[in-house]
Amino acid sequence: MPEPEPSFRGVSRARLERVREAEEARYARSNPRSHALAGRAASGYYAGVPMHWMLDWPLPFPLVVADASGATLTDVDGQERADFCLGDTGAMFGHSPPPVSRALAAQAGRGLAYMLTTEDALVVGRLLVERFGLPHWQVATTASDANRFALRLARAVTRRPKILVMNGCYHGAVDETYVTLEGGTPRNRPGLIGQFIDLTAATEVVEFNDVPALERALARRDVACVITEPVLTNCCMVPAAPGYHAALRALTRATDTLLLIDETHTISTGPSGYTGAYGLEPDIFVLGKPIAGGVPASVWGFSDAVAAGWDRVRREIPTGHSGIGTTLSANALAMATMRATLTEVMTAAAYGHMDALAARLARGLQAVIGARALPWHVARVGARVEFVCAPGPLRNGSEAALAHAPPLEQALHIGLLNRGCVIAPFHNMMLVCPATSEHQVDQLVGAFGDVVGALAG
């Protein structure tokens, strides 16, 4: 009998290579104008793209977008694609929602940045309190900024030097969160460019869902703040184990440690995020990316106790460079679009539509996987869905790191794109937005089945 072909996550390696090569050739044939334009547009940009993350798309050359509306992208070759990437959450509520477009047009002629408050800003403050519960809010430009500012404040008000992160976490471009566990030992995450200090001196790292490890790390009472997502995302998704969040909150309170919940991705859960849906009680809450409908903006809110600590710190130090805030934070354009998003876009009805279609998508993907008896699974948090090319559910960041399957994922991504569906390039993330249709969900499930069929044989 012939020897069986070597396999990778249930797929023949030889077949995987053949499928990837065929999909790359199909992409090159189908996108001649993108090829021509991307070649010319490369001039002036490092590596040919305006932001180096764009190199993470597993494509022979960049896809050039001509137009985006609702849940549909149209490229310069005139091809429409169902968009489930949605700007990797930046456009989670669809491209150019009409209320946001109207707010943009109305504000455009009235000035974009004053570094002064506006009527929109005053309304947004009340809306944030009503929606997310915490009484004090600040506005930043990105979730990275909001997390950075919040951690700086946490250290100041607690007078403690350390923060604690979960292994495998992602909180944007915040240096001290780039710590990982290697064989149980904390290390600087190797992908961080230009890092010249040992981040582990001021950052504790434990596995998500590991309550005993969390208890040991907090017992020393030198941690100012635990920063975590309620579900680990931007990796192979890791859900919270039953009782984990209750234990996390109890341990942080018992050790006088602040708890920061970063909802930038898990706002997919519902109108008040995972925090509102599951009754979490953070001291600090961060939300970026989609909060202004695609315009760069983020918010961070905090408790009365944190506010009192900030008041004390302000009395103790001279005025000047606080390291909290940037010139364009809370600009007039961001506040206008944030008001429109909170009042007219992030509605209960929109989330009802998103959740129902995301459930339909998850069922369809899982059915394809089950039909081929592949050792994969599907994870979902509200409107956010991921297929993971490994068994699940995953329990922590170490398992999530081992679950990644880049060669397989790359073939799947380009195969889906060739069949009219766009998913996030960094991992297998898909979002359903208010403009997504049943037809688009079924199109994605069908495309997934087609590509998986080609891979599995």
Image: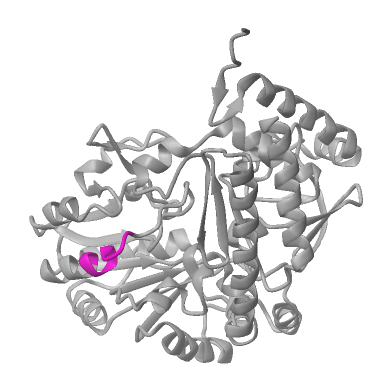
- 275 in the magenta segment: no
Measured from the top left, where is residue 45 in percent x and y?
A: 69, 38
Residue at the front extreme? 1
123 to 281, vertically: above or below: below
Residue drawn at (24%, 62%), measured in percent from left and top? 225
> Is residue 130 visible in the rendered structure shown here?
yes
User: In the image shown, does 56 or 447 lie closer to the viewer?
Assistant: 447
Measured from the top left, where is residue 434 in percent x and y?
A: 68, 73
> Is residue 327 visible in the rendered structure shown here?
no
Left or right, residue 315 beside residue 379: left
Left or right, residue 39 beside residue 93: right
User: In the image shown, does 327 or 369 lie closer to the viewer?
Assistant: 369
Residue drawn at (50%, 70%), measured in percent from left and top? 269
Left or right, residue 94 beside residue 134: right
Picture quadrant of residue 52: top right
From which residue to which does the magenta span run?
A: 241-248
User: In the image shown, does 408 or 182 lie closer to the viewer?
Assistant: 408
User: In the image shown, does 40 or 143 lie closer to the viewer?
Assistant: 143
